[in-house]
């Protein structure tokens, strides 16, 4: 999939889910003390990496792939837990975070030749 399409879709999803969490799920997220923070963190990371994917555009394939996969896993597990999924989903979240970190490392590694 085109990286700008991926960036646009992830960005739109992040904004929609952020708004839905702030307005449509406000009462539900208040039932579990950590739920609102999970939702906010998921939205922040999803949107941040959507912007990053869009910013690098066609320059670098692997960072964008890692960020897309990592965003879906990281944010997805946090959103799921905020909505009541079992807490063991939290054991999957670091896998997504590791993919996000790997994307940044790959970006740094592949960009070192350009400077």
Image (cartoon, grey):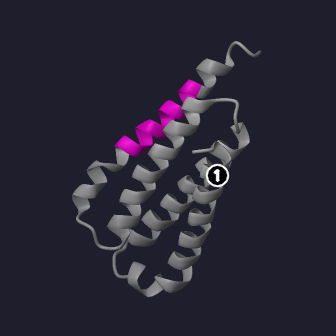
13 sits left or right of 57 in the view: left
Above/below status of 101 relative to 108 = below
Q: What range is drawn magenta here?
A: 95-106
19 sits left or right of 102 in the view: right
Q: What secondary structure predominates along the stretch shown in magenta? A: helix
95 sits left or right of 99 in the view: left
SS label for mark 1? helix
Task: Determine the residue positioned at 30% across, 48% down.
Answer: 92
Task: Determine the residue positioned at 51% across, 76% down.
Answer: 21
Q: Residue furthest right?
A: 115
How many numbered discs sit on the rendered protein? 1
Residue 89 position within the rendered picture, expressed as x and y whole percent measured from the top left: 27, 57
Residue 86 position within the rendered picture, expressed as x and y whole percent measured from the top left: 23, 65
Above/below status of 21 relative to 89 = below
Residue 74 position within the rendered picture, expressed as x and y whole percent measured from the top left: 42, 51
Q: Does the magenta stretch include residue 38?
A: no
The 10 Å Cα crowd at callout 1, few under 14, some 14 to 19, many 20 or more, is some
Q: Mark 1 points at which residue?
A: 5
Above/below status of 71 relative to 115 = below
Q: In which quarter of the image is the C terminus?
A: top right
Task: Determine the residue positioned at 40% across, 50% down.
Answer: 73
Residue 9 position within the rendered picture, expressed as x and y whole percent measured from the top left: 60, 58
Q: Quadrant of residue 10?
A: bottom right
Q: Which residue lies furthest to the top in this view?
A: 113
Task: Determine the residue positioned at 55% across, 55% down.
Answer: 46
Above/below status of 110 relative to 34 = above
């Amino acid at each position: 999939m085109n990286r700008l399409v991926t960036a646009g879709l992830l960005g739109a999803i992040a904004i929609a889910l952020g708004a839905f969490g702030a307005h449509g799920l406000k009462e539900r997220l208040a039932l579990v003390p950590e739920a609102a923070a999970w939702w906010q963190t998921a939205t922040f990371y999803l949107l941040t990496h959507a912007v990053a994917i869009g910013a690098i555009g066609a320059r670098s394939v692997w960072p964008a792939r890692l960020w897309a996969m990592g965003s879906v896993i990281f944010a997805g597990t946090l959103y799921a837990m905020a909505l009541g999924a079992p807490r063991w989903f939290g054991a999957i979240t670091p896998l997504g975070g590791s993919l996000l970190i790997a994307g940044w490392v790959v970006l740094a590694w592949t960009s070192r030749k350009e400077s």
